Image (spheres, grey):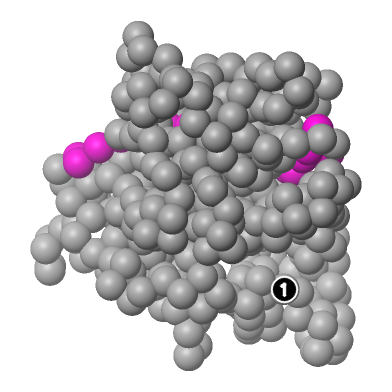
Amino acid sequence: MSACERYDVAVVGGGPAGATAAADLAQRGHSVLLLDRAGRTKPCGGAIPPRLIRDFEIPAALLVAKATSACMVSPSGRSVDMPINGGYVGMVDRDVFDEWLRTRAADAGAIRRTGVFERLSRDDDGTAVIHYRHGSTGGDETAVARARVLIGADGANSAVARQAMPGSKRPPFVFAYHEIVRSPTAGIVSDFDGARCHIYYRGSLSPDFYAWVFPHGDTVSIGTGSAQKGFALRGAVAAVRAVAGLQGMETVRCEGAPIPLRPRRRWDNGRDVLVIGDAAGTVAPASGEGIYYAMAGGRLAAEAIDTVIRTGDARALATVRKRFMTAHGRVFWILGLLQRFWYANDRRREQFVSICRDPDVQHLTWEAYMNKELVRARPLAHLRIMFKDLAHLLRLVSP
C-alpha cells in the first residue's frame, strides 16, 4: 500500500448507506475507498420492505424470514393482529446483509479497507486527507488516503460529522439494545410464530419507544430502546423475553447502539464532505426503521457526488438532503408527532393499540410501509381514521 493512496471518493462506514453509495459510485467508474470497522453489528430488528428489495435488487437468499403479520401488544396485555394481506416484510440478519452489501461494492470496483477513521486533515491544495488505523479496533499503524469527496456513513456518533461540520448539532437519539437468541422449536413456545412480529407498547419495557420480538428464521431479535438516560435496557429485554416465553432460549449475541430520532439540519460542509445514514439522522421516528432510508440516502449521495466530480460544482451536495426530505420528510414529520403523542404514557399507548384494530388503519399503514410513500388515493379512509382518532382522544370510545 502506498504512503498516500488517492481516490475520487472515500466512504467511512460500510453499513447499508455507505456500502450502497460506494457500490453506486464504483459502478459509475469512480475510484472509491470503503473504510469499515469490522466485527460489529448494529442492533436492528432487520425488517426491510418490498420496495427496498425491488429498488436495490436484494436476492431472496438474504431473507431469513418473511413476516406476514404484526401483533401489537398494549400495556394491559391486549393484542391486536395486523395481517399483511397479500404482502410481507422481509427479515435479514444485519451481519450477513451488511457484509453482502460491502462485497457488492467491492465487486463493483470499490477498494475495501478494514480500519478505524481517526481524523481529517487537508493537503496544501485543500484536498481532504483521511487518516485511519488498521484493523477492526484500530492498531498502531496509521494509513492515509486523499479523496476529492468524503462520505461519513459512520453512525449516529459520526466522527466525520464532528470534524468536518463542527457547527452541525447532533440530533437526539434513542439508545437501542437487543439480544439475538435461538428460535424455539415447534411447540415449545405456544405463542411463537416465525412469520409474526410482536411489538410491545408498555412503559415498563420502554418509556418512550417500544420493545420488539422479530423472527429471523433460526434466530429471534428481542430488543427495546429509550432516549431516557438511566433506563435499564437489559432488564427490559429480559422482561420481554419472559413475556414472550423466550427466556430459556440460548443467547447468540448482544448489541447496543444509538439510533437518531430526526435528520440533521445539514448534511454537507458545502465543499467536499457529506454525511448519510445514521450519521445524517435518516431513521424514521416511531418505528426506528432505518435500512431503507439509509440505502435511499446512499443512492442520492452517489448521484450528487457523481455530479460534483464531473462538474466541480460542490453545491450538488446540498441536493441530497433536499431530495431526501422532499421524498420522505412528510412521513418523518407525521411519525414524529405520532411518537411524541401516542408513546407519552400507558393510557395513550392503550388507545393507540386499540386504534390499530381498525381495518383502514391496517391497510393504509402496510401500504405506506411497503411502498415507502403516503397513500393519497383514499381520502375517505383518511377521513374515517381522523374521526376515529378524535373519538379515542376525547375518550368517547373505550380502548
Badge 1 element:
loop
Return the residue at label 1. Answer: 373
User: Is residue 193 on the magenta stretch?
Assistant: no
Quadrant of the drawing holding the C terminus:
bottom right
Compare residues 88 and 76 and report the one nearer the observer.
88
Name the kind of residue labelled 1 in the image: Glu
- Asked if 61 appears above or below 339 in the picture, the reply is below
Query: What residue is drawn where x is 75% and y is 55%?
Result: 310
Query: What residue is drawn where x is 60% and y is 43%?
Result: 9
Whether residue 44 is visible, yes or no, is no
- Asked if 33 appears above or below 291 in the picture, the reply is above
Whether residue 356 is visible, yes or no, is yes
Quarter occupied by residue 276: top right
User: Is residue 263 on the magenta stretch?
Assistant: yes
Quarter occupied by residue 88: bottom left
Q: Position of residue 315 (x, y in %)?
A: 88, 47
Q: Position of residue 80 (x, y in %)?
A: 51, 70
Tell me if 259 is positioned left or right of 376 in this view. left
Query: What residue is drawn where x is 33% and y is 26%?
Result: 136
Q: Position of residue 267 (x, y in %)?
A: 77, 40
Q: Residues within 10 Å of mark 1 (few under 14, many from 20)?
A: few
Region of the chain picked out in magenta, as a range: 251-269
Quadrant of the drawing holding the N terminus:
top left
Q: Position of residue 288 (x, y in %)?
A: 58, 50
Tell me if 266 is positioned left or right of 85 in this view. right
Compare residues 202 and 46 and report the one nearer the observer.
46
- Asked if 43 appears above or below 256 in the picture, the reply is below
Compare residues 342 and 32 and report the one nearer the observer.
32
Tell me if 133 is positioned left or right of 384 in this view. left
Query: What residue is drawn where x is 76% and y is 23%?
Result: 125
